[in-house]
Image (cartoon, rainbow, N blue to C red):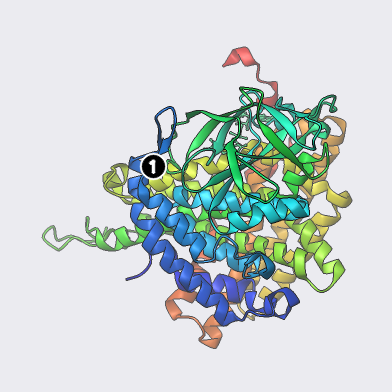
Amino acid sequence: MTSMLINREDLDFLLFDLVQAETLVTRDRYAEHSADTFRAIIEAAHTLAEEKFAPHNRKADENEPTFDGERVHMIPEVAEAVKAFADGGFMAAPHDEEWGGMQLPITINQACLALFRAANVGSSAYSFLTSANANLIRAFGTESQKQRFLPPMFEGRWFGTMALTEPHAGSSVPDIRTTATPVGDGTYRIKGNKIFISGGDHELGENIVHLVLARLPGAPAGARGISLFLVPKFRVDADGKPGARNDVALAGLIHKMGYRGTTSTMLNFGENDDCIGELIGEENRGLTCMFHMMNEARIGVGMGGTMLAYTAYLHAAEYARTRAQGRPIEAKDPTAPQVPIIEHADVRRMLLIQKSYVEGALGLCFYAARLADDARTAPDAAERADAEQLLALLTPIVKSWPAQFCLEANHLAIQIHGGYGYTREYPVEQFYRDNRLNALHEGTHGIQGIDLLGRKVALEDGAVLALLRRRIAATADSARACGNAELASHADALQAEWDTIAETTTQLRAVTKEDIRRGLANASLYLDMFGHGVIAWIWLQQAVAAHQAQQAGTRSAAFCAGKLAAARWFFNCELPKAGPQHALLRRLDATALDAQADWF
Ligand SMILES: Cc1cc2nc3c(=O)[nH]c(=O)nc-3n(C[C@H](O)[C@H](O)[C@H](O)COP(=O)(O)OP(=O)(O)OC[C@H]3O[C@@H](n4cnc5c(N)ncnc54)[C@H](O)[C@@H]3O)c2cc1C
């Protein structure tokens, strides 16, 4: 049976034809691997995702965790799944061998995680949060912290959270009020309330390690006065043994429209003035530590948004092939058999939109993951620096474009199912609800737009944007070199669009320097437009690779034709949408900026 999680030929194409993951094995860190081991690990992840995660996706949605005032209860399948994930070595997979890891490249690790996300986003979140938490301890922890906290996390016995948000400080993280007071023995007493903390309480393992942002006494206001603390649910002694309960209380669970399998918690730290935490990293550098890890975490969010739409697209395509309804528009005979709805052009239009969004977004996520690998392991220092900067520039797109446009693909998956898509008999409504989160957490769409236009495009005085444009020009050259008129025409369209983006950017940056409110007023539209330009570039890369595979006969004919059609769709029907957006941005449309609060 074909998988409903991902098209494996597409996954293989994106990893090996598009981002050339096998070239990573020339790096010392990955020398033990080969394209074969990569494929074998992905196969194992796929099997585990199908067998242990996918089967209870609906059940976890319908039976969300409950809190009886003392303990959190959830369906037993979640614990079995997260245990199987750790037992399979996936918790530690990207980490050093000395920590029991496989030293898997980030690109391949993301491919594995993509499968779990498609299978069951709620259950897989516990492990992914733990992995992000462990990453941060690995990067900034003392030797003792690493020794005590990492092994049980990698073994899947302890779990982790990221505790930033407070009721009055969501997007505005620098406004947090949680305090950390030195006790005198090197530890700190933590006091404050956190909200929306994913995986903040449960009984899946022996301990939960919260990474908590808090302020030291007398710390400067704002972002420069925030420190980061390790706050375990059960205190951890010098030998790493968990002991007495720390003063971290679950104030309640939050009930959500999607992602219901993951507990969302309100946590009270230090209600009894007895919550002990340890500083991690330097004082007042907590946000820097957090953000250091954000680029990778945000590839994960982009991947989550993409995969929830990818699996929905596969379900929609399958439904469209099997649901018979109506006849060809030109048919005259009312007794002729009905045709599968995939025969109707409008249904194929919806499938093409979905395909161009989800496969475009997945290509972008892998491109970003490859940059993360290059930033870490490329042999040449300049190449590492370029990869790091390019990743920083692309991160708002990687995080936000899938959240926005792959959600649109989820919406179309419901549309293809007709009225049945609106019922709970089919999974597409759950995928839509689950995916709705991704435009909200890890920086809302609006905040990402401000980050892109207000900061990222101006990195190094515009040199990083120039670097991106050089890479785009190189792709356009490779497309022209294919000797195919259609690819050459896509290349021209792409470069023309990027000339326009560069000019729009220059104009907006100039205004932003004079009047930041006016310059950034439409930043989220700028992000949508810039994102379409980036995805068009990813599609041209895919079209070139598909053309080459077609010529060489290395991929199936239908696969290559489908890729080229999706690229055509994106260039013919999506990229032109940017025109009116440029016009709006350039005339500094101030309708929203000038609107008054009492008009609404
Ligand atoms: C299911 C779920 C899981 C989560 N998991 C975690 C977690 O594990 N750990 C954690 O710390 N947090 C978590 N969060 C919190 C999440 O990161 C925040 O919800 C998010 O940052 C937005 O904050 P907010 O909800 O307070 O919205 P607000 O910040 O109040 O934003 C409301 C709206 O105003 C807009 N807005 C706000 N400020 C600005 C501005 N300056 N300029 C323009 N527009 C603005 C936003 O874009 C948004 O549209 C989670 C949230 C949810 C829903």
Q: Report whether the residue tagged 1 is closer than 8 Å to ligand 1.
A: no
* Residue at (60, 62) in percent of width and height: 92
Q: Quadrant of the N terminus?
A: bottom left
Q: How many marks?
A: 1
* Residue at (85, 24) in percent of width and height: 218
- Decide which of 283, 491 is in the foreground and name it: 283
- Decide which of 87, 567 is in the foreground and name it: 87
Q: Position of residue 295 (x, y in %)?
A: 70, 52
Q: Position of residue 180 (x, y in %)?
A: 75, 29
Residue with the most extreme top position: 598
The amino acid type of the residue labelled 1 equals Met
Could one spot residue 530 in this view of the protein? no
Q: Position of residue 579 (x, y in %)?
A: 64, 47
Q: Position of residue 100 (x, y in %)?
A: 62, 67
Ligand 1 shows up in which quadrant of the image? top right
* Residue at (28, 58) in percent of width and height: 341
Residue with the most extreme left position: 335
Q: Taking 568 as reference, is 170 above or below it?
A: above
Residue under pointer 1: 74
- Decide which of 142, 542 is in the foreground and name it: 142
Q: Taking 332 as reference, is 226 above or below it?
A: above
* Residue at (34, 40) in percent of width and height: 63
Residue with the most extreme bottom position: 552
- Decide which of 424, 205 is in the foreground and name it: 205
Quarter location, residue 556: bottom left
Q: Is residue 265 left or right of residue 411?
A: right
Determine the secondary structure under disc 1: loop
Q: Taking 480 as reference, is 132 above or below it?
A: above
Could one spot residue 160 in this view of the protein? yes
Q: Is residue 329 left or right of residue 514?
A: left
